[in-house]
Amino acid sequence: MEQASSLQEGKMTDLKTSLLEFLKSNCRGRDRAWPIDMLAGYFHADEREVRECLRRLNLEGQPVVTLTRKPYGAYFTSSQDDLDAYWRSLNSRVLKTLERMRAVNKIKTKEFVRDQMELFE
Protein backbone atom coordinates (compact mmCIF):
# COMPACT_ATOMS: atom_id res chain seq x y z
CA MET A 1 0.00 0.00 0.00
CA GLU A 2 2.85 2.34 0.88
CA GLN A 3 4.50 1.64 -2.47
CA ALA A 4 1.29 2.55 -4.34
CA SER A 5 1.13 5.83 -2.43
CA SER A 6 4.75 6.54 -3.30
CA LEU A 7 4.10 5.83 -6.99
CA GLN A 8 1.05 8.10 -6.95
CA GLU A 9 3.08 10.90 -5.35
CA GLY A 10 5.80 10.44 -7.96
CA LYS A 11 3.23 10.65 -10.75
CA MET A 12 1.82 13.84 -9.18
CA THR A 13 5.30 15.37 -8.94
CA ASP A 14 6.01 14.55 -12.59
CA LEU A 15 2.66 16.03 -13.65
CA LYS A 16 3.26 19.15 -11.58
CA THR A 17 6.70 19.69 -13.12
CA SER A 18 5.42 19.10 -16.66
CA LEU A 19 2.42 21.34 -16.06
CA LEU A 20 4.59 24.19 -14.79
CA GLU A 21 6.91 23.98 -17.80
CA PHE A 22 3.93 23.87 -20.15
CA LEU A 23 2.29 26.89 -18.54
CA LYS A 24 5.56 28.85 -18.61
CA SER A 25 6.11 28.04 -22.29
CA ASN A 26 2.58 28.17 -23.69
CA CYS A 27 0.26 29.91 -21.27
CA ARG A 28 1.85 33.21 -20.30
CA GLY A 29 -0.91 35.70 -19.65
CA ARG A 30 -4.67 35.66 -19.32
CA ASP A 31 -5.31 35.63 -23.07
CA ARG A 32 -3.38 32.36 -23.38
CA ALA A 33 -5.07 30.49 -20.51
CA TRP A 34 -5.88 26.84 -21.10
CA PRO A 35 -9.07 25.32 -19.66
CA ILE A 36 -8.49 22.67 -16.99
CA ASP A 37 -10.20 19.96 -19.05
CA MET A 38 -7.88 20.68 -21.99
CA LEU A 39 -4.84 20.54 -19.72
CA ALA A 40 -6.08 17.25 -18.30
CA GLY A 41 -6.52 15.84 -21.79
CA TYR A 42 -3.14 17.09 -22.93
CA PHE A 43 -1.39 15.45 -19.97
CA HIS A 44 -3.63 12.33 -19.93
CA ALA A 45 -4.58 13.17 -16.37
CA ASP A 46 -7.72 13.63 -14.34
CA GLU A 47 -9.02 17.18 -13.87
CA ARG A 48 -8.73 16.76 -10.10
CA GLU A 49 -5.06 15.87 -10.48
CA VAL A 50 -4.47 18.97 -12.59
CA ARG A 51 -6.26 21.17 -10.04
CA GLU A 52 -4.23 19.62 -7.23
CA CYS A 53 -1.00 20.31 -9.13
CA LEU A 54 -2.05 23.91 -9.71
CA ARG A 55 -2.76 24.26 -5.99
CA ARG A 56 0.62 22.77 -5.11
CA LEU A 57 2.36 25.11 -7.55
CA ASN A 58 0.80 28.08 -5.76
CA LEU A 59 1.91 26.66 -2.40
CA GLU A 60 5.45 26.42 -3.81
CA GLY A 61 5.34 30.09 -4.80
CA GLN A 62 4.62 29.76 -8.51
CA PRO A 63 2.45 32.55 -9.99
CA VAL A 64 -0.08 30.24 -11.61
CA VAL A 65 -3.58 31.69 -11.88
CA THR A 66 -6.87 29.89 -12.49
CA LEU A 67 -9.85 31.77 -13.84
CA THR A 68 -13.45 31.20 -12.80
CA ARG A 69 -14.80 33.52 -15.50
CA LYS A 70 -14.23 33.64 -19.23
CA PRO A 71 -11.78 32.86 -20.71
CA TYR A 72 -11.56 30.22 -17.92
CA GLY A 73 -8.46 28.11 -17.51
CA ALA A 74 -5.01 28.36 -16.01
CA TYR A 75 -2.00 30.43 -16.92
CA PHE A 76 1.39 31.60 -15.72
CA THR A 77 1.61 35.29 -14.92
CA SER A 78 4.15 37.95 -14.07
CA SER A 79 1.48 40.62 -13.56
CA GLN A 80 0.81 41.98 -10.09
CA ASP A 81 -2.69 42.97 -11.26
CA ASP A 82 -3.43 39.36 -12.27
CA LEU A 83 -2.23 38.09 -8.91
CA ASP A 84 -4.30 40.70 -7.08
CA ALA A 85 -7.41 39.72 -9.06
CA TYR A 86 -6.72 36.04 -8.39
CA TRP A 87 -6.34 36.74 -4.67
CA ARG A 88 -9.67 38.58 -4.63
CA SER A 89 -11.34 35.67 -6.41
CA LEU A 90 -9.94 33.16 -3.91
CA ASN A 91 -10.94 35.41 -1.01
CA SER A 92 -14.49 35.73 -2.32
CA ARG A 93 -14.80 31.96 -2.72
CA VAL A 94 -13.50 31.24 0.76
CA LEU A 95 -15.86 33.78 2.32
CA LYS A 96 -18.82 32.26 0.47
CA THR A 97 -17.74 28.80 1.58
CA LEU A 98 -17.50 29.92 5.21
CA GLU A 99 -20.95 31.48 4.95
CA ARG A 100 -22.37 28.17 3.70
CA MET A 101 -20.52 26.26 6.41
CA ARG A 102 -22.11 28.49 9.07
CA ALA A 103 -25.55 27.92 7.53
CA VAL A 104 -25.04 24.14 7.48
CA ASN A 105 -23.84 24.24 11.07
CA LYS A 106 -27.03 26.05 12.08
CA ILE A 107 -29.08 23.43 10.25
CA LYS A 108 -27.22 20.65 12.03
CA THR A 109 -27.72 22.34 15.40
CA LYS A 110 -31.40 22.89 14.70
CA GLU A 111 -31.85 19.25 13.66
CA PHE A 112 -29.91 18.02 16.69
CA VAL A 113 -32.02 20.09 19.06
CA ARG A 114 -35.20 18.87 17.38
CA ASP A 115 -34.05 15.26 17.68
CA GLN A 116 -33.16 15.79 21.34
CA MET A 117 -36.54 17.39 22.05
CA GLU A 118 -38.30 14.37 20.55
CA LEU A 119 -36.63 12.21 23.20
CA PHE A 120 -38.54 14.09 25.89
CA GLU A 121 -41.94 13.91 24.24
Image (cartoon, helix red, strand yellow):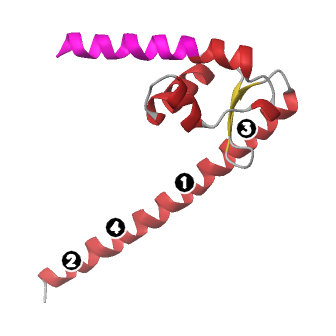
Q: Amino acid at mark 3?
A: Trp
Residue 67 percent across, percent down from the top left: 69, 41
* Structural crowding at the residue carrying mark 1, measured as other residues with C-alpha within 10 Å and reported as few (<14), some (14–19) or many (≥20): few
Q: Earlier in the sequence, mark 4 or mark 2?
A: 4
* Structural crowding at the residue carrying mark 4, measured as other residues with C-alpha within 10 Å and reported as few (<14), some (14–19) or many (≥20): few
Q: Which residue is mark 4?
A: 108
Q: Which residue is mark 3?
A: 87
Viewed as shown, does residue 121 lie left or right of 94? left
Q: Earlier in the sequence, mark 3 or mark 2?
A: 3
Between marks 4 and 3, how big is the CA–CA gap?
31 Å
For the residue pair 64 and 89, the one nearer the viewer reads as 64
* Structural crowding at the residue carrying mark 2, measured as other residues with C-alpha within 10 Å and reported as few (<14), some (14–19) or many (≥20): few
Q: Which residue is mark 1?
A: 97
Look at the image and give the residue range highlighted in magenta: 1-18
Q: Residue at x 48, y 66 (%)?
A: 103
Between marks 3 and 1, how big is the CA–CA gap?
15 Å
Q: Amino acid at mark 4?
A: Lys
Res. 115 mark: 2
Q: Amino acid at mark 1?
A: Thr
Viewed as shown, does residue 47 lie left or right of 58? left
Asked if the stretch drawn in magenta spans residue 92, the answer is no
Is residue 50 depicted above or below 88 in this figure? above
Viewed as shown, does residue 112 lie left or right of 67? left
The image shows a total of numbered marks equal to 4
Q: Is residue 112 visible?
A: yes
* Structural crowding at the residue carrying mark 3, measured as other residues with C-alpha within 10 Å and reported as few (<14), some (14–19) or many (≥20): few
